[in-house]
Amino acid sequence: MAAQRIAIRSFRSLPLLSRRGTQIHHGRRVSRYSTEAAVQDLINSPVSVEYDKLLINGKFVEASSGKTFPTLDPRNGEVIAHVAEGDAEDIDRAVAAARKAFDEGPWPKMTAYERCKIILRFADLVEKHNDEIAALETWDNGKPYEQSAKIEIPMFVRLFRYYAGWADKIHGLTIPADGPHHVQTLHEPIGVAGQIIPWNFPLLMFAWKVGPALACGNTVVLKPAEQTPLSALLVAKLFHEAGLPDGVLNIVPGFGATAGAALAKHMDVDKVAFTGSTETGKVVLELAAKSNLKSVTLELGGKSPFIVCEDADVDKAVELAHFALFFNQGQCCCAGSRTFVHEKVYDEFVEKAKARALKRTVGDPFKAGMEQGPQIDEKQFSKILGYIKSGTEFGATLETGGARYGSKGYFVQPTVFSNVQDDMPIAKDEIFGPVQSILKYKDLGEVIKRANNSKYGLAAGVFTQNLNTANTLMRALRVGTVWINCFDTFDATIPFGGYKMSGIGREKGEYSLKNYMQVKAVVTPLINPAWL
């Protein structure tokens, strides 16, 4: 099997290059990573690219146009591979394959238990190839290999096993009526699902969307992010090796304005699911409405508050707030990017947050022990540096970081701002990078009002030892998830989604199944029933 030919080499243990220094910024001393700590001696990727074409109807094929686009290594900006560039014509081909597989193929007609077994076999294959898949994800995305291999691929496997378990437990109800009628509901697959996933968690977002769609008996056309198309193609190949029928899962790499738009507005797609920015989510919703009014779920942006209460153990709060913001290079829609700290512990918290940021290891994500790799690409890298510049221009205090890390690739120094005010861009906008903004508050009523004063409502963190305080905040915060004394706890069973402009619908858990089913009511007259 092709995937088994991917060989993985042992990683060499290399020293961490993370000497720090200080610079004077606006008359005050700012602790920074030294520019001498350049990212150098990059480890060669331990895998090669096997799949770089579109996957349509069970076969890897070239794009109709013959075009390709480069996917880059964010460690140095060099080309990893040239990938087939799908466009509207290719989306048409993929949707036709998915439609035929749904209307005529075996997938929705086979028993739910048979679907369950195929999904379980797929999870087993991914688990078997954990290291190769993790290496490909790190190479294409830049996240630490240890994060990919020890957290994300095992979570991917768990998600598919979870949804495999649901496949034969989806059923309708028998409902009593006010009269002599037998009433039942059928929970039916919705049809062809179009799915558009982002670059920050390519495989996990694949699992969040493909898992429930297939468990419910649907067929799928998926467009991965143009920055990170490689892992989706590899795992989709493994899915077919597990026995997935042709046409059930189609992968069309390409750009949002062409392939993504064509999928969102396609008249033969019954449902579209999108994860990405709020601005693009609005476009997807509009295209879906203007075409065939297809069902839409959206998981969009966030500016999540992380609230440190006056009774907090400051050392523990600093570590958790650091994780909430800096995890995955800060490229998380639910990142705790507004760190609200009570005035009684504010100064102590700022000093310790600064010290923790300075200890963060940054560099080649293939090196052991590395906490932070590069940002995804030049565009995101420049956007982050622009927000850092705005932070100083608007009067926030730069405590540490604030610049590029090294001399190549898209690495950004872990950055901490204090004295941040609510009207500053770094406090309002989704930066999607390693920039911690620390705000001061006086009391619970004030922080609730300020935390809710955002167009987003995806998640929040609360750090307190007081049960009453936790209960007050969990009900007052207008967000889809509240983590109390924890953060980024993503179990397969826990629903995830947002209020306000953070999206529509929920992913993961039992709630996600509703996104991929239709409910049909069936009513039959009863003649001389023995009972009602």
Image (tube, rainbow, N blue to C red):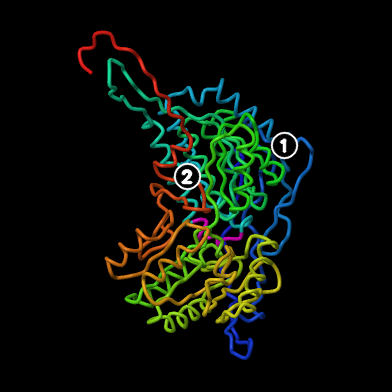
| Quarter assignment of residue 59 | top right
Q: Magenta span: helix, strand or loop, mainly?
A: helix
- Residue drawn 52% across the image and 40% down it: 210
Residue 66 drawn in magenta: no
- Neighbor class of circle 1 (other Cα within 10 Å; few <14, some 14-19, many 20+) is some
Question: Can residue 12 be seen from the camera position used here?
Answer: no
* Of the pair 330 and 456, the residue shown nearer to us: 456
Q: Which quadrant of the figure contains the C terminus? A: top left
Q: Nearer the viewer, mark 1 or mark 2?
A: 2
Report which residue position mark 2 lands on.
Answer: 505
Instruction: Establish if 466 lies above or below 521.
Output: below
Q: Which quadrant of the figure contains the N terminus? A: top right
- Residue drawn 48% across the image and 35% down it: 516
- Residue drawn 48% across the image and 64% down it: 453
Q: Position of residue 172 (x, y in %)?
A: 36, 28
Mark 1 → mark 2, Cα distance in angstroms: 27 Å
Report which residue position mark 1 lands on.
Answer: 88
Query: Could you tell me the amino acid type at mark 2?
Result: Gly
* Of the pair 237 and 213, the residue shown nearer to us: 213
Q: Position of residue 465 (x, y in %)?
A: 29, 70
Q: Find numbered disc 2 in the image and state the secondary structure of the residue it sits on.
A: loop
Image: magenta residue range: 142-149
